[in-house]
Every structure is written in C-alpha cells, then in structure tokens.
Image (cartoon, rainbow, N blue to C red):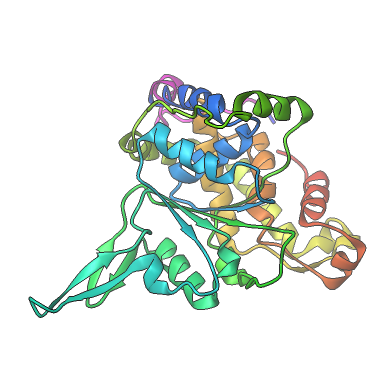
Amino acid sequence: MSEIVPPPAVPDSSSIEKASTWVQPLRNEIGRVLVGQAELVDRLLVALLTNGHVLLEGVPGLAKTLAVRTLSSALHADFKRIQFTPDLLPADVIGTMVYHPKEGSFTARLGPIFANLVLADEINRAPAKVQSALLEAMQERQVTIGENTYKLPDPFMVLATQNPIDQEGTYTLPEAQLDRFLFKVRVVYPTPAEERRVLDAMATSAPKLEVNQITKTEDIVASRTLVNAIYMDEKIRDYIVSIIQATRTPDAYAPHLKLLIRCGASPRGTINLALAAKAYAFLAGRNYVTPQDIKDLAPDILRHRILLSYEAEAEGVSSEDVIKQLLDKLPVP
C-alpha cells in the first residue's frame, strides 16, 4: 500500500506519542513480573482502550490470573476475581438486597463485578443463568439490584477464562454470548528460554512480585478520545469488510473452505476489528492504521466468531487455519 497520509483533522503523530508515553513503561513493568506474554498484555491494553472484554483460553498454570493482577497493580485499578462453579448464583456475581431486621429495611450489597478488572475464572463451569447475568452486565455496563440500577466503574473489563482440555462438568458458552467478547486469546506455553526465566524468578517459597504503579485508570479513559480519532483509510475500511464478508462467503475466495465454515462473523466483528486496530495503532505511537494491524488482530477478533462445520472438526481444522487461509487469499491494500 502507498504511504498513508492522514488528513489535517487527525491528531498528529507527536500528539499520539505524547499521549501514549505510559504505554512502554507499563509494558516494561508488567514484563518484569510476567514472562513471555507480551502479546497477551497488548491485547488487554487494546481491550481497555476500546471498552472491550477478553476471553482467555489456556490450560491452568499459564499465568492468566497473574497477568490480570499485575496489570491492575500497574494501573492502580480495582481488581476482583470470581471463581465460577456449578453452584454459583447470579447474586454472587452482581450483588443482592440484604435485609436488616432491626431497621426493618433492605440495603444493596454490591457484588464482586463492581471493579475495574474482573477475572471470571473458568466461566464455563457456571450454569447459563450466571453466565447471562455476567454477560448482560458486560454489555449494559450496569446492573439492577432490587429496584435500583447501579453503574459499573469506568474502565470496566471482564477477563473470562476457560480450560480447553477439561470439559467435564462445563456449560458451553452460546455463540451469541461469545460474540460479546472483543478478543478470544489463546494463552500458550512459554518457550524453553522463557520457562527458564520463570524458574529463576519463581522457584522460591516467597517469590517477590511487587508491581510499581506506572499510570492510572484515568489515563486509559482519557486516551480513548485520541484512539477514536486515529485515521483509518477508506481502503483499510474496505479491507476489514472484505475479511468479514469472506467468513460468510468463503467459496468466493477459497472454494474448499465452504464446507468448513458453518457460520461467519457478525457485523460486531467488523466494528470490533476496526476499533481494535485503532487502539493497536495508538499503542504503536501511530496516528493511522496499517493493513498489518488488521492482519495481526484478525485471528483473535474472529477466532470465536467463526463457527466451524462438523467436517472441519472431523478433519482437525481449527478456526486459526481457516482465518489464515482467508487472509492469504484476500488482496492486501
């Protein structure tokens, strides 16, 4: 693609660089505690900048909880962890009314969802009514307890985890609810070098995990105005639409994929890919989006939005395989 020249109305590069001075120090501070998860950290920052939520998929022990806790400490944000279990009730998540016999009155007891960062651990272990209560709060950013409605704090981000291996006693998240997550990130095992660093740092009965505050949540909220003003060329917009359209009509690009995709991405995928690309450019200190931004983010945006056919599952084809093939077939602007 030829050089992108943003119009005068777009904030200049120096404004973006000045507003994003907290980004690299924050990455460095988190990286000091969290080894080998730089991409995960960037996805979490993109979600914060776009008011999105993240679904983390990975086996236990890959530092998913540590990642969220470290990020909250570096931002001086309120953090809550909810362990989802089969006996969990919606009131355990959002809160409930408590009766006081002496006064003969009710007061609202707010649930753990009232935090900036909420870790919904093993979300697929709770029944559908609990999942729905959480996902409704994610969408509306407010909850109703009794007759009163309470707004959730800003920023507010839910990071839900699920184990791809252990499926016994789990409740699969419906596709409509999965679509509410900005990203579905696969957390992978560390490399040998990274695992050695983990060993050196953590092989003690009391590992030191102090995290310094680098910025504050107000800086995240303030940065959103600039993120929204990031320039996106018309050709980039068309490229995003063509990617989403390709998931619905794959036979127009790669005929053999028609039998592998049962359902393509919704328009929410189109919107989220554009929003995430702007935030991704902001983290890079740019005032414009590039085609590579789109290609980098597309797998995590689309992974949970493409439903594969039984033929694909039988052949061992993953959504990543399908997305990669579509991206390879589509012309890049």
In front here: 244 or 272? 272
Q: On the picture, is 190 further left or further right than 309?
A: left
Whether residue 232 is visible: no
Residue situated in front as seen by the camera: 329 or 171: 171
Tell me the quadrant of the picture where the C terminus can be found: top right
Quadrant of image for the N terminus = top right
x and y, in percent, of residue 38 in the image: 61, 32
- In the image as oriented, which residue stretches furthest toward the left? 103
Q: Position of residue 175 (x, y in %)?
A: 62, 70
Residue at image x 44%, y 28%? 211
Q: Is residue 283 above or below residue 13?
A: below
Viewer can see residue 8:
yes
Q: Does the magenta stretch include residue 91?
A: no
Please indicate whether residue 107 sits to the left or right of residue 172 in the image: left
Front-most of 233 and 83? 83
Q: In the image, residue 110 lies at what x, y percent? A: 28, 63
Magenta range is 2-18
Is 146 left, or right, of 207 in this rendering?
Answer: left
Residue 205 falls in which quadrant of the image? top right
